[in-house]
Amino acid sequence: MAADGPPLAASQALAPPGPVPRHVAIIMDGNGRWARDRGQPRVFGHRRGAEAVRRTVTAAAELGIEFLTLFAFSSENWRRPAAEVGELMGLLRLYLLKEIAELHANRVRVKVIGDRAALPTDIVTLIEGAETRTAANTGLTLSIALSYGARAELANATRQIVADVLAGRLAADAVDDQAIAARLSTAYMPDPDLIIRTSGEQRLSNFLLWQAAYTEFVFLDGHWPDFERADLERALDAFRLRDRRYGASVG
Ligand code: FPP
């Protein structure tokens, strides 16, 4: 991937030893542009993007990251041409069919967040099978955001809170940060420490809006299909140099 900072060796030399972020989330952007730059159809970029997913999951586990969350398909992506949506669903189907055995052997726990009602039923069955099979694994937790939109997630949590208050299960004045977080699809994971976005765009695009309150961001210029372990390491180096104060004053 084209570097937008110092070469990896130099940035590694500069980076102080520090903790690996527990939770890294990635907005995998630029598959279409990557394909267009090569005179290929967008689907070509998505296919190569799926290969980058495989490499990244392996690298994240090896680097000691505990939670990796990948934005694979947003609630807005349904607006794309049917052929492209079909191709993306096909790649996700293939991933869930072909990769789960190896992920399971590597102790990866697989989870999927997002609106399952919108997904083809066979993919929902594959998701449920993958989640059940890997539920007890203690290695990396890989969460795939599929048909996911943070505003819809927050609206859903709000509906649950209203129902709980109306049913007398929850006092209105007990609705606090924790009550909301517990009703999000991400309740099982810590908030992301680091969000990486490829392809030069610098926005969140309805991804983990609540959870990203204190997240650090690293934006890379290269497109997702070119994403390599070295890019992940470079993002971790940048993260280690950040001063996270969570609203406190400079010490
Ligand atoms: C963004 O590129 C990428 C997507 C909308 C889909 C991401 C999907 C994959 C990486 C492949 C399948 C995923 C898994 C988990 C197996 P874009 O199409 O928006 O690119 P552009 O902005 O250049 O048009």
Image: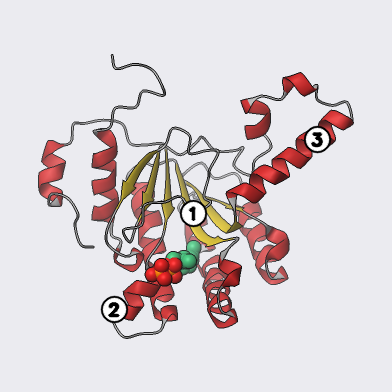
Residue at the image position 60 percent from the left and 69 percent from the top: 78
**Is the C-beta separation of discs 3 and 1 under 8 Å?**
no
Q: Nearer the viewer, residue 210 or 146?
A: 210
Instruction: Pinpoint residue 37: horizontal percent, then vertical percent.
Output: 29, 78
Q: Position of residue 62 (x, y in %)?
A: 34, 48
Residue 37: mark in rendering: 2
Q: In which quarter of the image is residue 221?
A: bottom left
What distance separates the C-alpha of mark 1 from that of mark 2? 23 Å
For residue 162, which numbered disc appears in the image?
A: 3
Circle on res. 205: 1
Q: Is residue 118 left or right of residue 72?
A: right
Q: Report which quarter residue 180 is drawn in.
A: top right
State the residue lying farthest toward the right.
167
- Tell me which numbered mark, 3 or 1, is placed earlier along the sequence: 3
N-terminal label among 2 and 3: 2
**Residue, x 39% and y 74% (percent of image)?**
32
Q: In which quarter of the image is the N terminus?
A: bottom left
Compare marks 1 and 2 and give the one earlier in the sequence.
2
Please name the amino acid that badge 3 sits on. Answer: Val
CB at disc 3 and ligand 1 closer than 8 Å? no
